């Protein structure tokens, strides 16, 4: 049991690391185009914020907070963006059930846009004001990152460690995995290895090493491994079908999922991801948890406005419960 969980956790964590790196690169290349698009209309704000939220990881949520603090997107757009955000869990979902994960992201994206529009109408009617202390009306663009072949020969400890780890784990998965996982591992290994080679020293150290490898990956591995072990123990020692046959079991789990989603942390929500992957809970419970939770996305917001952060969480909690229970009642 432990060996199987360890193997699955290593595979998932490697895929998560690779996707985090790719998303970070995409963010560095496209972030400077956001300002022009967002300023065109409120609808563009809703679409942009929800799209950023539905992209895997915390970068989209952090960007939304920055845009909100600088008065570029509305409060409703911020709420919609956080509804669409699934934090690091999104990467794990893509690794465990990619097709269903993409469907979930699409549903969250749509819910985010609609919710953003409704929230802006609602708070305007009740005189709620946001960003009153904001004096900066321009978005701080990301520092321009220069990728190129001239960085290939620049070898240092962090880069060497990442290159060797990527190669060793990638090759190991080629022998341990099979089918589509083996092909995916080969493509991701080649992609990440190549990107690391052409990246400047500052980018590798600050973005890849300090932020992704040291901060996110240990947390993802620990929670994934722990969740897999716990769920496997439950499945092997308890009659889950009998427990879930209790009429209120799913309703209680949905409420629990929404409550845990309030925590500004990615790890605890992985329990629901694993339970869904193993067929223990329906889509409605995972959706409710995903609507309420936003990984680390709200942490920067807490330092800016505790009041706005609480209001965002309360609204998302209500929306998550309402949609989750509605879908649960119709058997989804």
Image (tube, rainbow, N blue to C red):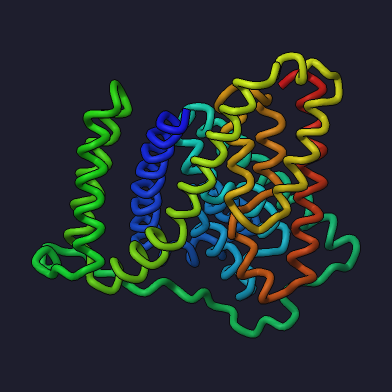
What number of labels is visible?
0
Left or right for 62, reference 2: right
The residue that appears at 23% across and 72% down in the rendered structure is: 201
Q: Residue 181 at x, y = what percent?
A: 32, 28
Res 299 visible: yes
Q: Position of residue 90 (x, y in %)?
A: 52, 43
Q: Nearer the viewer, residue 53 or 90?
A: 90
> Foreground residue, 204 or 132?
204
Camera sees residue 106: no
The foreground one among 77 and 175 is 175
| Location of the C terminus (image quadrant) | top right
Q: Where is residue 292 shown, x and y percent of the image?
A: 71, 48
What is the x, y in percent for residue 78?
66, 59
181 left or right, relative to 240: left
- Say above or below: 127 vs 295: below
162 to 183, vertically: above or below: below
Q: Residue at x 72, y 83 (%)?
A: 133
């Amino acid at each position: 049991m432990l060996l199987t969980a360890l193997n699955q956790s290593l595979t998932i964590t490697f895929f998560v690391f690779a996707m985090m790196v790719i998303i970070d690169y995409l963010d560095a290349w496209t972030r400077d185009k956001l300002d022009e698009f967002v300023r065109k209309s409120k609808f563009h704000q809703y679409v942009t914020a929800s799209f950023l939220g539905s992209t895997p990881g915390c970068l989209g949520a952090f960007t939304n907070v920055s845009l909100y603090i600088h008065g570029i997107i509305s409060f409703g757009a911020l709420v919609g963006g956080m509804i669409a955000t699934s934090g690091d869990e999104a990467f794990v979902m893509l690794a465990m059930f990619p097709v269903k994960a993409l469907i979930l992201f699409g549903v969250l994206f749509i819910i985010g846009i609609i919710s953003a529009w409704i929230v802006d109408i609602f708070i305007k009617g009740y005189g709620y004001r946001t960003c009153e202390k904001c004096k900066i009306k321009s978005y701080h663009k990301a520092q321009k990152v220069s990728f190129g072949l001239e960085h290939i020969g620049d070898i240092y400890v962090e880069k060497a460690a990442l290159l060797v780890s990527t190669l060793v784990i990638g090759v190991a998965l080629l022998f341990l995995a099979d089918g589509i996982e083996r092909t995916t591992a080969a493509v991701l290994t080649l992609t990440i290895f190549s990107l690391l080679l052409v990246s400047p020293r500052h980018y590798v150290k600050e973005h890849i090493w300090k932020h992704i490898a040291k901060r996110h990956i240990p947390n993802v591995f620990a929670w994934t491994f722990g969740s897999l072990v716990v769920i496997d123990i439950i499945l092997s020692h308890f009659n889950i079908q009998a427990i879930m046959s209790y009429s209120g079991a799913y309703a209680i789990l949905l409420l629990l999922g929404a409550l845990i989603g309030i925590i500004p942390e990615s790890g605890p929500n992985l329990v629901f991801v694993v339970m869904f992957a193993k067929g223990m809970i329906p889509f409605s419970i995972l959706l409710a948890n995903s609507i309420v939770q936003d990984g680390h996305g709200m942490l920067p917001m807490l330092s800016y406005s505790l009041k706005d952060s609480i209001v965002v969480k309360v609204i998302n909690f209500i929306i998550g419960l309402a949609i989750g229970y509605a879908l649960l009642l119709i058997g989804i």
